[in-house]
Image: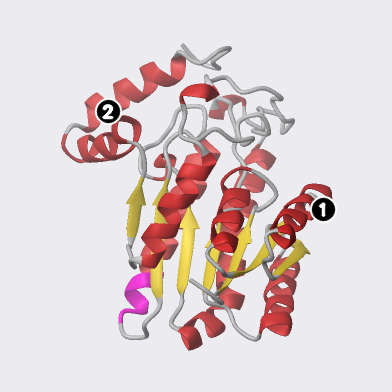
Amino acid sequence: MKDKVVIVTGASSGIGRSLALVYGERGSKVVIAARDTEKLAEVEAELRKMGVEALAVQTDVSLESDCRKLIDQTVSRFGKIDILINNAGISMRAIFRDLDLQVMHRLMNTNFWGTVYCTKYALPYLLESKGTVVGVISVAGHIGLPGRTGYSASKFAVRGFLDTLRVENLKTGLKVLVVAPGFTSSNIRRAALNADGKPQGETPRNESSMMSPDKVARRIYRAVRFHRRQLILTFMEGKLAVLLKQWFPRLVDWQTYSQMAKEHDSPFK
């Protein structure tokens, strides 16, 4: 990956930050994007301290103009794009019947449209480099999670979009990887939106037992390097659940409901 130009969205914390550092360690030129300029500057400083050629671009991926700016500034600085990692995303936690529909719009605008916008403007350069598009979804993009209708819907949509993009480009050399982490220790649950669109402020799950962002990032790095098309992380909550969903869908529905209902202050029982 030495001298490859890599864009990571949602790079100010969690998996995105870890991905930026992993690629930086391997000699890539790293472009980091996020809304939070303060945290973005901190990650950029970490990369520069490592001797990495880095570019930080404040980006709200829900805005098409910001996504275009991100791609334009990358190409202006480095002249090419080899890997685009669509990692930026937000979550939610509420029963659909109680949900303000604006929450659904925000989820789709960031998670789905953010991936579409960035991929659209990066695609000509990725085709030229025969590069890789990565979409970081979630196991929620394979299995519907109760209390996360907007989140699951957006992640299913990203998976459908990228799977189709892969088929369209079977003869162009473009690689497409869809990554579905299981529960990962990150800020996404603390920032998850409640029924009226406000951040819930605290995680309802035990974060200490989850996979770390660094481990997820290393697995994604290897998957990109070896041109994988799909990566599902964690065994019980990930690979096994997705497999069982194909053969025993009702069982997985009930088990998923039971597990999510055990969360602290669950919106359903």
Note whether residue 60 is visible.
no
As rendered, which of 18 and 269 lies closer to the eye? 18
Quadrant of the image occupied by residue 142: top left
Which disc, if any, is residue 264? none
Identify the magenta region: 165-170
Mark 1 or mark 2: which comes first in sequence?
1
Which disc, if any, is residue 252? 2
Does the magenta-highlighted stretch encompass residue 167?
yes
Q: Circle 1 is placed at which residue position?
A: 37
Q: What element carries label 1?
A: helix
Residue 64 image position (x, y, % from top left): 70, 67
Q: Residue at x 50, y 16 (%)?
A: 263
Name the outermost residue toward the left.
247
How dense is the environment of label 1, judged by Cα within 10 Å: few (below 14), some, or many (20 and up)?
some
Amino acid on which disc 2 is placed? Val
Horizontal side of 230 relative to 33 (left or right) equals left
As rendered, which of 1 and 50 lies closer to the eye? 50
Task: Determine whether 38 is above or below 33 in the image.
Answer: above
Residue 111 image position (x, y, % from top left): 58, 52
Task: Determine whether 155 is above or below 211 in the image.
Answer: below
Residue 12 image position (x, y, % from top left): 70, 49
Does the magenta-highlighted stretch encompass residue 199?
no
Q: Residue at x 47, y 29 (%)?
A: 210
